[in-house]
Image (spheres, rainbow, N blue to C red):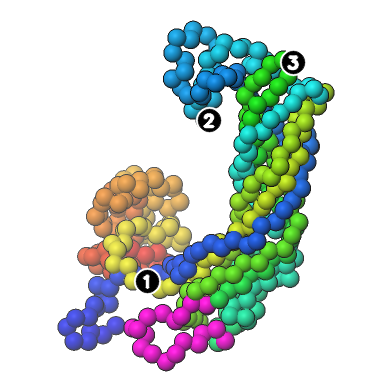
Amino acid sequence: MNCIQNNCTCANQSGNLVYLTKVFYDAEENSSPILTTLTTSSEGFTQQLSTGSTCGNQSWNCSCDTGCSSGCGCDICRNICCCCGNDSCSNLTVSASTTFDVTNAYVVTRSFDLTNPTLPADLAITVDGTAITDVTESGGQYIGDISGIMSQITKCPCKSPCSGNCPGHFVMVSATGPWSLSAAIVIEGTVRNGGNTCQFRLCFNTVDGTPISVTGNSSFALCGVDIPCQAAGVAPSMMFDFDACASVLNPVLTGGANGTVTLNCSLVVTPQVRLRVTRPSLFDLNAREVAMPCDDLGQCNACDPSEAFCLRSSENDCCCGHPTVNRVNEILNSNNTDNTHSAATGCCSCGCGGYGEQQRQDTREITCQCCDTNGYSF
């Protein structure tokens, strides 16, 4: 561009213009909880039972092993241990007569998503009451296209661009279940079996491919969503992904004759949605460009005498189709701009030096075309 006044940046000194995906809004919102009845099975869950001896009135802490020579069991997950010398708990076998007294239970959610949704019917999204253009799914993330409604939702009052952003928008997300929940359910308490009383910790994990089915529809209301304008023909997008927090209600454990334990309970699942509003935005980066030679596509011509040195020279044996050594650190630390051979990259830009091309004086300049080929020099 031409220089205007004295405070401009000339073309050969400007930074690089690049498109980056800018995040304008990032927030989460919950919907109403969904109550789901659950009964575990060996087909849908793995289970792991760990037990430790009880201490009566003795507190559970890691200082209780003072004076104990044996029988001290530690639970590294809760950082507790108890010394009662009751080794029978370490060999406890579950049977139909085993009873469980549950004192604590919680759920660790691994993934939560719609089960085979039909888009966009099962994921209705509106902005200020206007349905968005389309919804697609990619890698577990839902992408809302709002390019077709920009003229309807971009209603900022007339004001200077320097006075701030438009007021936030109201986004409504209505998702039609069922949902698929993958999680670990942890139950803790006291187990009694054959006259022994032991502390226990029982973990149920959903088997891959057999998530918990959560039936119910959910609605999410997000207020004050910052949606930027359309710029240079590029409209913003809305990206959604789902998660959930869950808790256990009224857990009951039943021992089986085969040594397994069945959990009957209700899960209270609270779906969550995370919304990000993004748009590719043009940035001016005043960064120093790394001097990298172009690929040897069409650069080395064996029939051109002026380029024969590149093929014959042992010094330049890395050229013309030979692999380039990966020397990233050397590239970043080097200012070598020799057109014929770069010590930083171990490669040459074939033939460029033979033509007396003007070498780059500043690595921030635009790359120049060289030789009678489609190669570029730096």
Q: Residues within 10 Å of mark 2 (few under 14, many from 20)?
A: few
Q: Residue at x 74, y 33 (%)?
A: 253
Residue 107 at x, y percent in the picture: 62, 43
Residue topped by disc 1 = 283
Name the residue nearer the viewer: 193 or 301.
193
Q: Residue 2, image x and y in percent?
A: 26, 85
Three-letter residue code for mark 3: Gly
Quadrant placement of the N terminus: bottom left
**Residue 141 higher or lower than 75, as above or below:** below
Label 3 Cα crowd, 10 Å radius (few <14 / some 14-19 / many 20+):
few
Q: Which residue is mark 2?
A: 77
- Which of label 3 and label 1 is nearer to you? 3
Q: Quadrant of residue 264?
A: top right
Where is residue 63 drawn, in percent x and y? Answer: 43, 20
Can residue 206 be seen from the camera position used here? yes
The residue pinned by badge 3 equals 194
- For the stretch drawn in magenta, the main secondary structure is loop
Q: Amino acid at mark 2?
A: Cys
Q: Which amino acid lies under the numbered mark 1 shown in the image of this protein?
A: Phe
> N-terminal of the two: label 2 or label 3?
2
Residue at image x 69%, y 30%?
A: 101
**Relative vertical location of residue 153 with respect to residue 262 in this rendering, above or below:** below
Dot 1 or dot 2, earlier in sequence: 2
Q: In front: 283, or 237? A: 237
* First to last magenta residue range: 152-169
Residue 260 seen anywhere in this rendered image of the structure: no
Q: Secondary structure at mark 1?
A: strand
Distance between the Cα atoms at labels 1 and 2? 48 Å
Question: In this orientation, which residue lies closer to the viewer: 63 or 120?
Answer: 63
